[in-house]
Amino acid sequence: MITVAKALDAIFDLVRPLGTEEVPLADAANRTLAAPITASRLQPPFAASAMDGYALNGVEADPEAMFRVIGESAAGHGFHGHVGPGECVRIFTGAPMPDGADRVIIQEDVERKGDLITLARKLDTVPHVRPAGADFAPGDTIPAPRVLSPADLALAAAMNVPTLTVTRKPIIALMATGDELVMPGETPGPDQIIASNAFGLKALIEANGGHARMLPIARDNADSLRTAFDLAADADLIVTIGGASVGDHDLVGDVAAELGMEQSFYKVLMRPGKPLMAGRMGNAVMIGLPGNPVSSMVCGHVFLVPAMRAMLGLGTAAAPRKTAILAAPLKANGPREHYMRARVDGDEITIFDSQDSALLSVLSQANALAIRPASDPAREAGERLDYLPI
Ligand SMILES: Nc1nc2c(c(=O)[nH]1)N[C@H]1C(S)=C(S)[C@@H](COP(=O)(O)OP(=O)(O)OC[C@H]3O[C@@H](n4cnc5c(N)ncnc54)[C@H](O)[C@@H]3O)O[C@H]1N2
Ligand code: MOO
């Protein structure tokens, strides 16, 4: 058995960053930017008013001074004359500052009668002008790689870049295995249960920028498993669920090996998730997850998401950890790194009493996996513990 850190490194050795594709800006949310975005324009392209009011020469802006309104500058329709001494221009937010004006007096500080305005006795000192290029200038970039946020997309649009170069989404085939499984909505036989794991994993994959393809459930026999592997052959990553342990019906490893899977490792010193396996299978990487529902989701967070991030070109790093203060004492841990279902509120972490890896109801109440290192000694309430937000 190898450690979690070694298993993750072995998975990073198996995966490669994928190629790129061009996508329209409107379809680029949450995609991974593969080439920097470069502005070819200045924003704002002109000095612009930040408020509705009157544009004038700031040196003349004395309390109670009077000005004549000689025109109007609105967003999209600037004033193209010159503002001379004693003159001002009615101006609106986003409009170009007219020549000769460098300050905007907000309309709340102005009394207007016909074409004349009088400034208030007390004026704020802010010029309310956005200089040309205050936001960005030609050559400014949004660096890659990064997962594109809503703000990045708005910025790319403002830079007038209509299509972006992103990393291709990893195609991940999800292969549930087991004679006991039926799909949600079907009627299970007396010895059957509903296949749940692939649904959680699909959501996890898609939230992290992958494309999950759910295969038909493979049965616990070699022919059915071969057919399912065949359907998965063009995926970047083949994720099997279940059939990974040592029972007579746990055939995934054997069938994968028969189909040419070069195994990198089998079994990890972690809890849950011990019977994890990984290897190379043709052009794809194969990760075999344990069948217990919580085990498969924990391995999804600890291995699958970092593997996907590596494929997306986002680097090879373990899932980022945080720390919180233990709400109650903990007994010493055994020899496997333990990922315990827990709830973080504020800075405090409460570990659930029940840690059975079959209990999805507990996982669904959890927002964290508390991480106990192998052979971690007993802990007191108030000590800090690492956790993965989930
Ligand atoms: N003698 C031993 N028995 C077991 C060991 C061991 O070391 N020695 N390891 C245990 C551990 S740890 C785990 S984890 C499980 C994992 O076994 P498998 O990966 O072979 O998984 P299955 O036996 O196929 O299923 C386990 C459990 O999960 C249910 N399951 C499977 N797939 C799904 C699915 N898609 N949706 C919902 N539930 C699923 C399945 O019905 C079983 O109840 O092995 C232990 N045994
Ligand atoms: O490791 Mo199993 O994954 O304990 O449930």
Image (cartoon, rainbow, N blue to C red):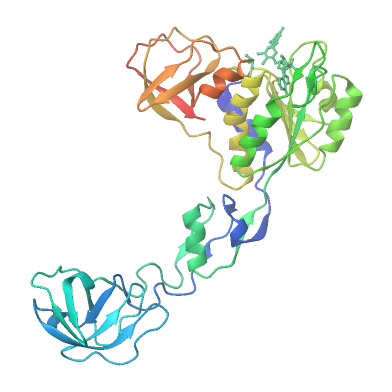
The residue depicted at 80 percent of the width and 30 percent of the height is 261
Q: Position of residue 121 (x, y in %)?
A: 8, 72
Judge whether 168 appears above or below 178 on screen. below
Q: Position of residue 284 (x, y in %)?
A: 76, 39
Taking the image as four quarters, which one is ligand 1 found in?
top right
Q: Is residue 165 left or right of residue 214?
A: left
**Can you see residue 102?**
no
Q: Position of residue 155 (x, y in %)?
A: 47, 62
The residue depicted at 16 percent of the width and 91 percent of the height is 85
Location of residue 122 (image quadrant) = bottom left
Judge whether 332 appears above or below 262 on screen. above
For the N terminus, the quadrant is top right
The residue depicted at 62 percent of the width and 47 percent of the height is 312
Front in this rendered view, residue 300 or 303: 300
Location of residue 364 (image quadrant) = top right
Q: Is residue 225 left or right of residue 76?
A: right
Front in this rendered view, residue 248 or 350: 350
